[in-house]
Amino acid sequence: MIDSGRANLAVASAFVDALASNGVRHAVVCPGSRSTPLAVLLAAHLNVRVWVHIDERAAAYFALGMARQLGESVAMLSTSGTAAANFLPAIVEARLSRVPLIALTADRPPELRDWGAAQTIDQLRLYGEHVKWFADMPVPTADEAISRHARAMAARAVQTARAEPAGPVHLNFPFREPLLPPDLRLSTQLASPIENDRGPERATTIEPGSLHADEGVIAGLAALVAAEPLGIVVCGPGEARGPASAVTAFSAASGYPILADPLSGLRFGTHDRSHVIDTYDPFLRDQPTAEALRPEVVIRVGAIPTSKPLQQFLAARSETPQIIIDPGMPRDPSHGASDYVHANAAVTLAAVAERLASMVMPANRDWLNAWKLADCATRNAIEQSLARDDELFEGRGAADVAAVLPEGTTLVVGNSMPIRDVDAFVRGDQRRLRIVSNRGANGIDGVLSSALGAAAVSDRPVVLLIGDLSFVHDLNGMLAAKLFDLDATVVVINNNGGGIFSFLPQAEQLDGHLFEALFGTPTGLDIGGAAKLFRASYARPATWSAFRRDLCNAMRQSGLSIVEVVTDRDRNVVQHRAVWAAVASALRSDAGTGR
């Protein structure tokens, strides 16, 4: 008769030790019975830190935030049934934003599936195409081949999650009862791995590679750029760190301005920023300026830009060659790409820049200067507009948050209005700031948990800028800050509802009551009361000077701090449009915008 408890222990031990050997240092574990073998082995491993989170949805986003911050795989474990289903939203985000999560779900053995057993659902390919790879593990037996298989599968899971483009994987573990040997006594003080009768074996390790373009593609790109000086580089949201040096080297060699999304890693940092343009969102709203800056070539890296005016600017030029350099699936919803280079963007651009350095390039300083003049005029117009406005305006809130962040801070930005305001109002500088957001699926769920996951593994400040609906949507995510004694600052822009909808046609097409019921969706919840519930410090400043003071104080103190900024949704629309009008006026008076 098979000793299920010892078989479960041996397989879980082999699997967990191989995860650790392949670089997995953190595991987010949700409580449950069926997942016991993996949970206790993760907790017993000296090289894996376990974070126990009671809510699977929040836990998965917490793991996503950790994995993105670290740039490495993080495991997350659930028991069987609907618990596993709650991982799905974060897995969707991880796939689209290319974050290497390893989802581990416990399951009933095959003989109990589809027979009405409690807490049993169909978990085979539960996440569908949203994971890069799925495997239903065999039921553990005493056969050493099964343990060797577990070690190999752990190594493969890490390699697949990290391989370009990175993303989530899913392994489903059926365990028979008894889940552990009845005489077992585990302690987190145990050395690892827990040895079976044959002793520990060396775990398989696999290192992911990088996708490189061949020499013919590099030569072709260099020839195209050398022949056409009126080009631009569009850097959208990026997953990997370190593309700045390659992009700036390419820009220096080509003379192409860099349109840097706030999530690209190009706006802030010690790299050469002389060709970086970061006010394109406001000035491309002005059609004469957009027409004067029409490029002849577009090189695009990263995901689609956050800025809708930039997206429209690119989509309106279907005849212009647009080359997308990306190792993953096409990220081109307007279908405007003329060429798609399936390769690592940083490696490719560095190689093209090296070739360009030895080629004769047609000089066109007027082209780059035209972009810089528009950038400068827009920057000045925005600064003057914000300085004159004493009201609590959401655009100024984004600018002021970024302005006071200390070196090394990670700024996590919520979707809807916060990320758009960061794009439009935050100007870059030499500080090494990191700006991240869940822009894969652009959802408002799990943002708070993602930020706290980043804070859990960061030794520098983490600040979250988030809207009130997104904050409320993930309210229970704050429990992680209390349980793990995390230091983080949350800035809640509270316009009592969905502010972004006020900018859409629905706001004009529907009467006020219907619009508020379907789109405005005010909650009227007390943010300060939520802070008290989770033992967070709280401030609600009424002026800009008080806001900056409260924000700086929040970043200096330990624990979770919440700073609430109360704004008016209707006034927010008026204030945004006033800034865009000021920018257009400044561009009209600037004679340098053109070729």
Image: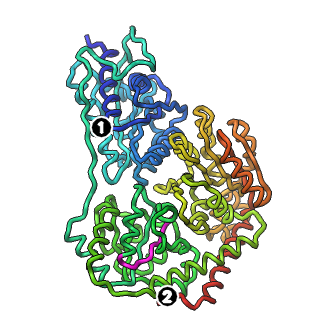
Q: Is residue 497 magenta?
A: no
Q: Quadrant of residue 545?
A: bottom right
Q: Residue at x 44, y 25 (%)?
A: 43
**Is 309 placed left or right of 39 in the picture?**
right
Q: Amino acid at mark 1?
A: Ala
The boundaries of the magenta stretch are: 253-261
Residue 425 spot, x, y in % from top left: 61, 68
Residue at 64% x, 54% y: name it.
467
Q: Earlier in the sequence, mark 1 or mark 2?
A: 1
In the picture of the structure, the residue carrying the numbered disc 2 is 292
Depth check, mark 1 against mark 2: the one in front is: 2
**Residue 259 is inside the magenta segment:** yes
Q: Which residue: 46% across, 82% down? A: 368
What mark, if any, has residue 135 been given in the picture?
Answer: 1
Residue drawn at point x = 25 percent, y = 70 percent: 218
Circle 1/circle 2 CB separation < 8 Å: no
Q: How far across and down, in percent of the image, does residue 10 sit?
A: 30, 20
Tell me: residue 197, above or below residue 583.
above
Disc number placed over residue 318 in the picture, else none: none
Residue 437: image location, x then y, percent: 52, 55
The amino acid sitting under disc 2 is Ala
Instruction: Confirm whether residue 549 shows in the render.
Output: yes
How far apart are the alpha carbons under marks 1 and 2? Answer: 54 Å
Q: Helix, strand or loop at disc 1?
A: strand
Question: 10 Å neighbourhood of mark 2: few (<14), some, or many (≥20)?
Answer: few
Quarter that holds the N terminus: top left
- The correct choice, above or below, for 315 with respect to 85 in the image is below
